[in-house]
Amino acid sequence: MTQFRNKQWIYTKRPEKVVNQSHYTLEENVISISEVKPGKALLKSVYFSIDPYMRIQQSKHNTWEEPHPLDTVQGGAVVAQIVAINDNSSSLKKGDWVLSYTGWQEYAITEISNLRLLDPTKISVTTALGVLGMPARIAYFGLLEAGLPKEGETVVVSGASGAVGQIVAQIAQIKGCKVIGIAGSDEKTKFLKEIIGVSEVINYKKHSSAKEMYQELKRISPEGIDIYYDNVGGYITDAVFEHININARIIICGQISQYSGGLDTPEMGPRFLHKILYKRATIQGVLARDYNQRMDELLSEMTPWVQDGLIKYKETIIKGFDQLPEALNMLFFGKNMGKLIVKI
């Protein structure tokens, strides 16, 4: 019976601050086609999604779920090919590209019902991890249903060159909004301005305090801010709250500035609540999983946008299974642009 040597990254130590390879153990085992029971498929992983939520799950406290268990394979979305399948009635077949949530392992056995078929003849399969995947889901539904953008409004997006931010910025523009993109380098702000086409950009590293950031926001958006899509938190968010308009909508998607050390001992919080009162603003947290059952709705609208070039996207692809822990570490130092992916 055919066997495959399988590598797995096992999550073995809970990080207190920055996550890196010391929090994982690389193990090897053997996986056999004989282990593929009815209703299941054996997958060969090719592309691994690297996402900030992985670090949230490593908190010692409950977040939206219990902490990621130690001594298990690091979870995460994967684009893979089917090596073997045990279900004659399934439309899936050997060789098909699929999206799964089988984590950091070279081979995996999973339920067929958990798989999403991908068509590489129509669009790159990597888009299932980014611009047509989980980041798109939270960008699309988070902005449209929590933000309720209206033509002519001003939208500020922090982490705007990231996997979620680049999509939020473009959907806001499609809806007729003025978009201000905040990112952490001139290369990233150039991408936002010249490729994504946002109205204004800010390199936050050139404005190192809330006061400086507020002055820059006030300069480039004297009309104020109607929607803030927050992927970052920290002093950037403090500055934005000083410049929001009446009935502003604040969408909290991520707080990556707090993930390396602030998850278990967060910084002081409600400094801005008086502004929420004065401006009658709303704050809503959004999670991609809340919209899992609406993926078809998203794909029907966004797939043509991507195919036609109305939505542009950037991917950073790191090669090598052994690079997975360090790739996760990269997220918290701004070393990627757009969606971060590891390829075997």
Image (tube, grey):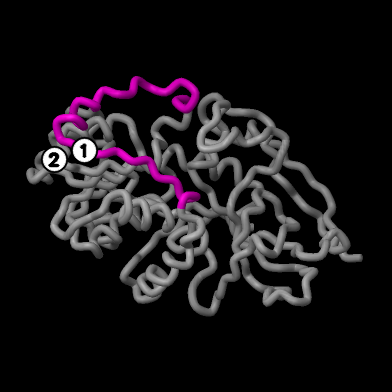
Q: Is residue 184 visible?
A: no
Camera-nearest residue between 302 and 107: 302
Disc 2 residue crowd, few under 14, some 14–19, many 20+, Cα 10 Å = some
The disc at residue 281 is: 1
Q: Quadrant of the N terminus?
A: bottom right
Relative image position of residue 135 (x, y in whole percent): 44, 54
Task: State which quadrant residue 311 falls in.
Answer: bottom left
Q: Secondary structure at mark 2?
A: strand
What separation in Å lies between label 2 and label 1 (alpha carbons)? 6 Å
Q: With respect to residue 93, does 44 lie above or below?
A: above
Q: Quadrant of the C terminus?
A: bottom right
Q: With respect to residue 149, does 60 lie above or below?
A: above
Q: Amino acid at mark 2?
A: Ile
Q: From the image, tell me which residue sits under label 2.
A: 246
Check whether the beta carbons of the residues at disc 2 and disc 1 lie within 8 A of each other: yes
Measuring 58% from the left and 28% from the top, which residue is drawn there?
15
Asked if residue 272 is among those painted magenta in the image, a careful observer would answer yes
Left or right: 159 in relation to 156:
right
Q: Secondary structure at mark 1?
A: loop
Q: Amino acid at mark 1?
A: Ala
Relative image position of residue 164 (x, y in whole percent): 39, 52
Which contiguous range is marked in magenta?
261-290
Asked if residue 41 is among those painted magenta in the image, a careful observer would answer no
